[in-house]
Amino acid sequence: MKAKAGITVDRRSILRTGAAIGALQMVPPVIIAARGETPVRIGMVDPITGVYAAIARGEVDGAQLATEELNKNGGILGRPVELQIEDSANDVGTGVQKTRKLIERDQVSFIIGDVNSGIALAMTQVTKEKRIVHIVSGGHTDPITGSNCAWNVFRVCNTTTMDANAIAMTLIERLGNKWYFFTPDYAYGHSLQAGFEKILKAHGGSFAGDLIPLGTADYSAYLIKARAFEPKVLVNNMGGGDQVASLKQFVQFGLDKQMGVGGALFELESLRAVPDDARIGWWTMEWWWDQPGVPHVREFSAAMKQRTGQQASARNWFGYVSVKTAALAANQAKSLDAVKLARVLSDFKLPPEVALQPGSPRFRSGDHELMSSVFVGQAHRPEGDPDNMFTVQDLVPGEKAAGPVEEAGCKLEWPT
């Protein structure tokens, strides 16, 4: 590898001198050189390319910030932290392969990921087999901490049930109970729509909809079917680039004049990518940067803005919390043993500087789901700050949104 000055250096030298390897792999080698110690390695698998690239990039940015902060403050167990990032390319097989590589070849002590629920669910089979703590940063499908839960798996983002429970009554009461679904045809979409259907049926509603492949570019056929059904609400469950494309075309077809729109997540990365006319509807955020009076939120968002040029997003927070959770668990357990780490994290409360929201979110002991608040509100054109495109109308506590642990379907079995 050639340095800019023409000096030839090998990869090992780069690690020692502090140069970065790869656009997405953040290694703090100055600290490694100073201490001469083996780093604690954290593996992260996310779809850095593909339809979910923007939200995956958000998680990576947050994880990298957390890693930098740790290395400025003693690392993990007094050792430097190395974040190793792999691209799942939005493909289950690739995600599983990259997870095995990180564990078997790179000897990571934790796994984080994936944004894609189907990949995250498949990764849990590998991490359970390999007995390594797995923090699911952004894959929402219910079975991860429900019917397929595992002693070593903890989730930062909400379940689909939590998001559906938080927003469903707002959509019914404000817009009506005749819905048409746009739902991505994989694990996340299936469980999210099921959660919505349960509530809608209980309140006398009716619905129709489509399961739509990831990466769909043309939504005209689906929009024509939605218009013919004459719903009160188009419930748009698409994510990332798919949500951006479908909402753009929803407005272009003029359907915003005929029906309301809303759903579980309209993430800040997606809000930034749509035109002003498509910044509409009622949605949830799983974290929001504008929380006046909540300790440490302003500082976190400022740190992210210095890094990315924009206010912090929920995805930034997911990545940040995932890395900080790994460090907190190891430093409290004084160990990298997976069972000891998992025991510490079971019912573990996030400190205020990591929680960055009211209350004390905890990883519920019965299913290892983080009981974080759900921010319910309305999307709109920017007001003042370019990222001020969402007004929070209600803050739903995680315990209320999740419901009893018994309903999650999780039966944790610990190693003997």
Image (spheres, helix red, strand yellow):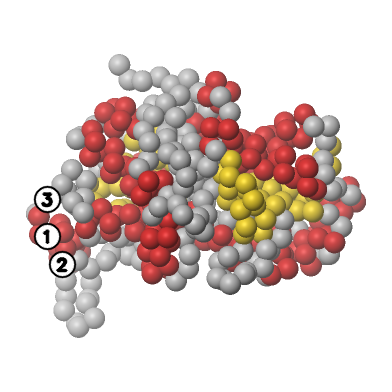
Q: Is residue 112 above or below residue 63?
A: above
Q: Quadrant of the C terminus?
A: top left
Q: Secondary structure at mark 1?
A: helix
Q: Quadrant of the N terminus?
A: bottom left
Q: Read off the residue under disc 3.
A: 37
- Which x, y percent locates residue 18? 19, 66
- Which x, y percent locates residue 42? 30, 47
Residues at marks 1 and 2 touching, judged by CB atoms closer than 8 Å? yes
Residues at marks 2 and 3 touching, judged by CB atoms closer than 8 Å? no
Amino acid type for the residue under numbered disc 1: Ala
Of the two numbered discs 2 and 3 on the same chain, state the one appearing first in sequence: 2
Identify the residue at image location x=34%, y=35%. Answer: 133
Residue 205 image-quadrant placement? top right
Which of 57/96 is in front? 57
Q: Is residue 410 above or below residue 186?
A: above
Q: Read off the residue under disc 1.
A: 33
Label 3, label 1: how far apart the Cα atoms are: 8 Å
Q: Read off the residue under disc 2.
A: 17
Q: Is residue 308 above or below residue 185?
A: below
* Left or right relative to 113: residue 254: right
Amino acid type for the residue under numbered disc 2: Thr
Amino acid type for the residue under numbered disc 3: Glu
- Which x, y percent locates residue 357? 46, 47
Q: Given the current orientation, which residue lies at the most extreme top position? A: 416
Q: Is residue 102 above or below residue 311?
A: above
- Which x, y percent locates residue 383? 62, 69
